[in-house]
Amino acid sequence: MIIFATSDKGGTGRSVTSCNVAYRRALQGSNVCYLDFDFGSPTAGAIFGVEAAGQGTSSGSGLHSYLAGNVAEAEQLDVWTGSGLGGRWSKPLGAGRLTLLPGDFGGGEFPVDDAMVDRCCELFLSLDEEFELTLVDLSSGRSYATELVLRATADPAIAEKTARWLVFHRWTSQHIRAASSLVHGPQGILDTGTGCGHERRELEDGIRFVRTAVLEQGSAQLEGLRPEQEVWLQAINTDLQKLAGKLRLGTSMMLGSIPLDPVLQWREQIIVEDDISNTRIANAETGKAFEQLAERLTDDGMWEGL
Amino acid sequence: MPAPVPARARARGTPPATLADVDVLVGEVRTTLLQNSHQVSAETAARLLDLDPGSRVRSATRPFAHAVSPDERTGVHCPLVTSTGTAANGVGTVLARVSVTGGVILQASARTRLVRAVGERRLPWSHYLARPGVIEVDGRSSGDDLADGFLQEPTRTSAADPARGPLDLGAVGNRLLTRVQRMPHIDRVTLLRARRTRLRFAVTWQPPDPSDPPGSEEPAAPDIEFVVHDESLRTLRLRLPPQVRDLTDAVVVCEDLALHDWLLSTVGSLVDNSRIGVDPAADVVARIRPAIDHLLHLWMPGAKVAENLAGIWAALERRPGFSKQWASLRGQIQNQLMMAILESQSVVSARSSNAFNDGFEEVSHGA
């Protein structure tokens, strides 16, 4: 299965959430590979703590070079062994592979041509031989990367594979509008996809939304609020829910909601068990949200057509 | 962590100081699982491998189903890696073919013979095309230098000059694999997730031993260095006795070794990740099942190998001992199957005794 992670705007926590989801999924026993298609700013290496590819790889064989046809094979890094996060990162018993295909250091966006689409197809197919889950982190907004994968997944050989989309957005009215427009708006995912030969309905059934940095009602973080603030927050939340419902990203279209966690506000990182139970810098709810999202990626009940 | 496994250490003759002949067979085999929900029939395999309408796919059914595509030629003009760092350039052609074994294992192998170029200048392509599977090498490198250089992990090409990367036979094979995996005759449903492995090989020939009587029937033993570098890369360095000259036979040995090494690696990692001893045996068996259904019966090391190269498999069976490791894996799988049966029986008996107790309690409550 191929999962595409995209977002309306930058700064939604798309990459850090996707990395954490990939990590959780590997812990659950799946072989997972993570493709950094955010060509403008490849950061997955830094989030995973893989020193060799902090801001993208310098080997000259990252995804950017591969897609451009400069190298025959894209570099693959094993996160379990390559991560500089220390001894606690040895591969746990029964965990699957966790492999990073980094972007290139100093890469950038580029127009898509047919040869590139073909190489992208070959990459997805060969990764599918080895990995249950291929997670592709796209650049935010309407990008060449999005166009590339929409064209690649329209190829008959890839179309047989299940492809699903996660659209990340923050819980504000601007973000909700932008996320809806990214999917349903002009030159959005559905428009572009239909132009590439996708069935609009089928593509739409494979799209779900993920809310990030959400302040949950009744969470400990809201305890210190004045009553006026609490009332105001509640009113805003109700408005946002109405707006989201109207713009077709209501609760039925939501795959998960990641609570606001101070750790992720200050440092984009993988939240491991140790951060929750020993050093206690991260909240248990955040870990749970990642884990739940990881499970739901392949839970067909969550992906039934509406 | 390279762990060299010299099957037999043997002193080599010192190479002469003047430019000696170069004759090195180099190649790379890529092995993976054919992406289909079940094993393909011989007809489908033949259709998958029909890359060139002008030639025929060769098929065999004994001792297992095996089909090989015709050779495909690729022209190359590129630098060659040498272990000493001496500059060397090669012009010529590479032969590549792809095969399906047992209806499930897909292999591509690309190989070429490195020989010394006669002149300094590059000749017209027709010259090279007339000698398929031969690359003519300029420079002063010796055969051993080229062979050892080829086996090194290639340094990544610089992005600045991507067109001048060194000879990459793996990429040639990979293209064939990808081409087959995209064919319409298969459904691309994956039986199990397995790595693509790479076996890079270099073969040279021992200098004829003057002490051997001419026409001696007993060939000298080959020198073998088989190294497992990481989860996907293996290298094989062969020094064959001068009597054994058949290149095709040598390639078949390497393909056969790559196939069995892939079986070991794939089934081994499946067993490693099946949480034996932690989860109930039934869950473990469910994870291992694809190997039981599709792979275990394909173990036949050396079955396709020519008589005069059988010594290679014999040496590898002594050390590192392929079949010993395989037997141990099989044993482990069989034990888990037995455990699953035992556990299911104990669950059934526990359930029936519970049912009896429950019934008894109900009766006593009622009373």
Image (tube, coloured by chain):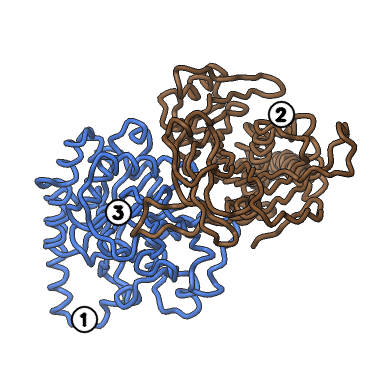
Chain colours: A blue, B brown
Label 3 packing within 10 angstroms: few (<14), some (14-19), many (20+): many
Secondary structure at badge 3 equals: strand
State left or right for residue B318 relative to residue A55. Answer: right
Measured in 3D between alpha carbons, the distance from the residue under mark 3 to the one under mark 1, in whole angstroms, is: 34 Å
Which residue is denoted by mark 3 in the rendering? A5
Looking at this view, name the residue that lies furthest to the left: A186
Asked whether the beta carbons under mark 3 and mark 2 sit within 8 Å of each other, the answer is: no
Q: In this rendered view, identify the residue nearer to me: A53 or B136.
A: B136
Q: In the picture shown, does residue B298 fall above or below A13? A: above
Which residue is denoted by mark 1 in the rendering? A225
Which residue is at a point 73% across and 31% down the rendered structure image?
A: B305
Amino acid, disc 1: Leu
Q: Quadrant of the C terminus of chain A?
A: top left
Label of residue A4 in the image: none
Which residue is at a point 75% across and 42% down the rendered structure image?
A: B240
Question: In x, y percent, where is residue B84?
Answer: 59, 62
Secondary structure at badge 2 equals: loop
Subunit of label 1: A
Question: In x, y percent, where is residue A253?
Answer: 24, 48
Question: In x, y percent, where is residue B192?
Answer: 54, 39
Which residue is at a point 34% across and 54% down the rendered structure image?
A: A65
Which residue is denoted by mark 2 in the rendering? B304
Amino acid, disc 2: Lys
